[in-house]
C-alpha cells in the first residue's frame, strides 16, 4: 500500500474530484446542464435546505444566493474530496467507495429531477469513473507517490527542489506547482533520495495536468452548453400585435426622480426569484402547454397555437412574498399574453376543482385559486415583457402573470402545464416548506428617496416612493416625521389597480435626526398595519421607516 503524505493524498483526492466534476460538464452538453453533478446535487440542496437557512441566504446574499450556494457546495466537496484522498492512501478501496458514493448521489440527483431520463445519469457516471481512475493512478498507479515508507516525514535537504539538477528531459516544476507540494523540503532537513524528487515531480505533473484538463473540460463544457441555449430561438420570435393593447401610461405616472423606482421596470433590472440553478432553456418549437386534470375538455397547445390567439397587453406589478418591508423584490412591466380565463373556459373545470397548478418544465409548481383566474382580472399566459419576448430568466417562452397574487402562488415561469385540482388534494412547491397556500399581495408602501442614513440640507426635501395593493388599488399614501401627524402625500396617476403608484411629499426639513415613515390605504379603505411581521408565511407587514440627518 502507498505511503503518501497526507498533503499529497489530500491533493490527489481534490484533483480526482476536480476531474470528476470537470469531465462531467462536456457530457452534460449532450444530456442537459441540469444533469451535471454539481448542478444536480445543488438542485437537491436548494429543494432540501431548511426554510430559515434559505431566508438567511436571500437576506445575506440577495441575488447572489445561487452563486453562494454553488461556492459553498464546491468548498464542502473539496473538503470531503481531500478526506477521501487521505482515506484512499490508507485503503484504496475505501477511497474508491467514497467516489462511488458521490457518483451515486450525482446519479440519484440527476434522475430525480423533473423530466429526467436515463441519459441524465451519464455525466455523473463518466465523471465518477474518471475520478476513480485518477485517485487510483495517484495512490497505486503510474502517478503514485510511493517512494518507500516514511517518505513524507523524512527530513529533507537544505536546498530547494528547484536547485537540484533536474533529471534529463524532466523539466523543473514551475514554482506555483512546486509550492503546492505539501511535503516541500524545508531548510535544515536531510537530503532526499533522488527517487523522492522524481516521485514528487511525477505527482505534481500529474496534478497539474489533470487539474488543467478538468478546468478546460469544465469551462469548455459549460461554455458549449451555453451555446446550446435558446437565445437565438428567442430572438426569432415575432410577437403578435395585441387585440387589446395596454391603455397608455398616463402622463405624470413617472415622476422621474433620481432613486425613485421608475414606473416601468426595465427587463434587465427586473428582480429575479426562482429555484432554478441553471436557467431552463425551453425551445419554443417543442414547447407544449397541457391544460388537464379535473377538466371536461383537456387542451394541448403549441407555441404557435398560443401566438395565434387574441392577445392582450397589460401593465401588472409583480411582487415576491419574500420582499421585506422596504425591499426591492417587486417590479412593474407591460405583459403581452392570452387571458388564462379564456383557456379555462374552453377546458371547462369540474365542480370543486378550486386550484390551478402551474407546473414549470423544471418541476416547480404554484397553486392559484381557479376562482381568481376566472373573476375577470387580467391573469395572463404571458409571452411578452415590455415589448420583447420574455427574457429567458423570466420564463421564456411562456409564463403566468396574475394581478394581485404573490409570485410563488401565481407567476409560474417556463410553464408547461395547468393542472386543475383542489387545494385539498395538492400542495404546490412552497406550501410544504411552510408558506401559505393562499398568497394575496398585501398593501405596502416604500420610501425610495431619501435613502436611509442620507445627510440632507435643511429646507424643502422631496420625499417619494411607490405604493401597491394590486387589484384593489391605492387610495391614499401618508407620511409622518418623528411620530408626528400623518400627512397625505400626492399620488401620481397610474395605469390601473394592478400596478404600483408613485407618490411624493414635500417636507420642510429642519436640522437634526429625523425618522420618516410611510403607510398606504387601499381602495377598499384598509390601511396597512403598523405591526411588523416577517415575510413567512404570507408576506411582511409594517411601515417602511427611514432615518435621515438634516444638517
Ligand atoms: N418555474 C418557476 N417559476 C417561478 C418561480 C420558480 O422558482 N420557478 N418562482 C416564483 C416566484 S417566488 C416569484 S416572486 C416570481 C418571480 O418572477 P421573476 O423572476 O420574473 O421576477 O416567479 C415565480 N415563478
Ligand atoms: Mo417570490
Image (cartoon, grey):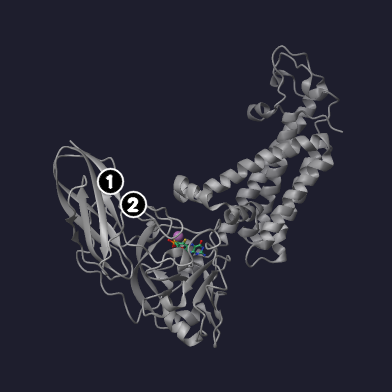
Q: Which mark is residue 326?
A: 2
Determine whether the residue tagged by mark 1 lies in a helix, strand or loop.
Answer: strand
Q: How many numbered marks does the figure carry?
A: 2
Q: Earlier in the sequence, mark 1 or mark 2?
A: 2
The answer to which of 427 and 115 lies nearer the viewer is 427
The answer to which of 273 and 123 lies nearer the viewer is 273
- Residue 143 makes an appearance in the image: no
Marks 1 and 2 close (CB-CB < 8 Å): yes
Point 47% across, 80% down: residue: 306
Determine whether the residue tagged by mark 2 lies in a helix, strand or loop.
Answer: loop
- The image quarter in which residue 530 lies: bottom left
Location of residue 171 with respect to 210 vertically, above or below: above
Residue 345 in percent (x, y) is at 46, 86
Location of residue 265 with respect to 199 vertically, above or below: below
- Quadrant including the C terminus: top left
- The image quarter in which residue 121 lies: bottom right
Location of residue 459 with respect to 479 vertically, above or below: above
Point 72% across, 29% down: residue: 7
- Quadrant including the N terminus: top right
Residue denoted by label 1: 546
Residue 246 in percent (x, y) is at 30, 74
What whole-number distance in Å separates the C-alpha atoms at marks 1 and 2?
A: 9 Å
- Residue 250 makes an appearance in the image: yes
Point 81% across, 42% down: residue: 94
Residue 236 in percent (x, y) is at 47, 71
Point 84% across, 42% down: residue: 93
* Ligand 2, image quadrant it occupies: bottom left
Q: Is residue 159 left or right of residue 258?
A: right
The answer to which of 430 and 194 lies nearer the viewer is 430
Give neighbour class at mark 1: few <14, some 14-19, many 20+ (Cα, 10 Å): many
Amino acid at each position: 500500500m502507498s505511503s503518501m503524505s497526507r498533503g499529497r493524498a489530500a491533493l490527489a483526492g481534490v484533483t480526482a474530484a476536480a476531474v470528476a466534476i470537470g469531465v462531467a460538464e462536456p457530457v452534460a452538453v449532450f444530456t442537459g446542464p441540469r444533469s451535471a453533478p454539481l448542478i444536480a446535487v445543488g438542485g437537491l440542496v436548494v429543494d432540501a435546505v431548511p426554510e430559515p437557512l434559505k431566508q438567511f441566504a436571500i437576506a445575506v446574499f440577495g441575488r447572489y444566493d445561487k452563486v453562494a450556494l454553488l461556492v459553498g457546495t464546491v468548498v464542502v466537496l473539496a473538503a470531503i474530496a481531500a478526506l477521501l484522498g487521505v482515506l484512499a492512501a490508507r485503503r484504496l478501496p475505501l477511497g474508491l467507495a467514497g467516489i462511488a458514493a458521490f457518483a451515486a448521489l450525482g446519479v440519484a440527483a440527476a434522475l430525480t429531477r423533473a423530466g429526467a431520463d436515463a441519459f441524465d445519469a451519464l455525466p455523473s457516471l463518466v465523471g465518477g469513473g474518471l475520478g476513480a481512475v485518477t485517485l487510483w493512478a495517484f495512490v497505486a498507479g503510474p502517478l503514485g507517490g510511493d517512494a518507500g515508507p516514511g517518505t513524507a516525514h523524512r527530513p529533507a535537504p537544505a536546498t530547494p527542489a528547484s536547485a537540484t539538477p533536474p533529471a534529463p528531459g524532466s523539466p523543473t516544476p514551475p514554482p506555483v506547482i512546486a509550492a503546492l507540494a505539501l511535503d516541500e523540503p524545508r531548510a535544515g532537513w536531510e537530503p532526499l533520495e533522488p527517487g523522492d524528487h522524481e516521485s514528487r515531480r511525477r505527482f505534481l505533473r500529474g496534478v497539474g495536468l489533470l487539474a488543467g484538463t478538468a478546468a478546460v473540460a469544465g469551462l469548455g463544457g459549460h461554455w458549449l452548453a451555453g451555446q446550446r441555449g435558446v437565445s437565438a430561438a428567442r430572438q426569432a420570435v415575432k410577437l403578435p400585435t395585441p387585440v387589446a393593447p395596454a391603455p397608455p401610461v398616463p402622463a405624470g405616472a413617472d415622476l422621474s426622480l433620481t432613486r425613485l423606482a421608475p414606473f416601468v421596470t426595465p427587463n434587465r433590472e427586473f428582480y429575479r426569484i426562482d429555484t432554478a440553478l441553471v436557467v431552463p432553456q425551453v425551445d419554443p418549437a417543442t414547447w407544449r402547454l397541457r391544460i388537464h386534470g379535473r377538466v371536461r375538455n383537456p387542451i394541448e397547445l403549441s407555441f404557435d397555437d398560443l401566438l395565434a390567439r387574441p392577445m392582450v397587453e397589460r401593465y401588472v406589478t409583480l411582487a415576491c412574498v419574500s420582499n421585506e418591508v422596504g425591499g426591492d423584490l417587486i417590479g412593474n412591466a407591460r405583459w403581452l399574453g392570452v387571458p388564462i380565463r379564456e383557456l379555462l373556459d374552453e377546458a371547462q373545470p369540474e365542480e370543486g376543482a378550486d386550484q390551478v397548478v402551474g407546473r414549470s418544465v423544471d418541476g416547480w409548481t404554484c397553486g392559484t385559486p381557479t376562482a381568481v383566474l376566472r373573476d375577470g382580472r387580467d391573469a395572463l399566459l404571458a409571452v411578452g415583457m415590455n415589448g420583447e419576448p420574455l427574457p429567458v430568466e423570466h420564463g421564456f417562452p411562456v409564463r403566468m402573470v396574475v394581478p394581485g397574487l404573490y409570485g410563488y402562488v401565481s407567476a409560474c415561469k417556463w410553464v408547461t402545464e395547468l393542472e386543475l385540482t383542489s387545494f385539498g388534494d395538492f400542495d404546490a412547491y412552497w406550501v410544504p416548506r411552510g408558506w401559505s397556500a393562499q398568497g394575496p399581495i398585501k398593501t405596502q408602501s416604500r420610501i425610495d428617496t431619501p435613502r436611509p442614513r442620507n445627510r440632507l440640507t435643511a429646507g424643502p426635501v422631496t420625499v417619494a416612493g411607490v405604493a401597491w395593493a394590486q387589484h384593489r388599488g391605492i387610495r391614499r399614501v401618508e407620511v409622518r416625521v418623528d411620530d408626528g401627524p400623518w400627512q397625505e402625500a400626492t399620488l401620481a396617476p397610474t395605469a390601473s389597480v394592478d400596478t404600483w403608484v408613485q407618490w411624493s411629499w414635500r417636507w420642510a426639513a429642519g436640522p437634526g435626526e429625523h425618522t420618516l415613515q410611510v403607510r398606504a390605504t387601499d381602495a377598499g379603505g384598509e390601511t396597512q398595519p403598523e405591526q411588523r411581521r416577517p415575510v413567512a408565511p404570507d408576506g411582511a407587514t409594517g411601515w417602511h421607516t427611514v432615518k435621515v440627518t438634516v444638517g
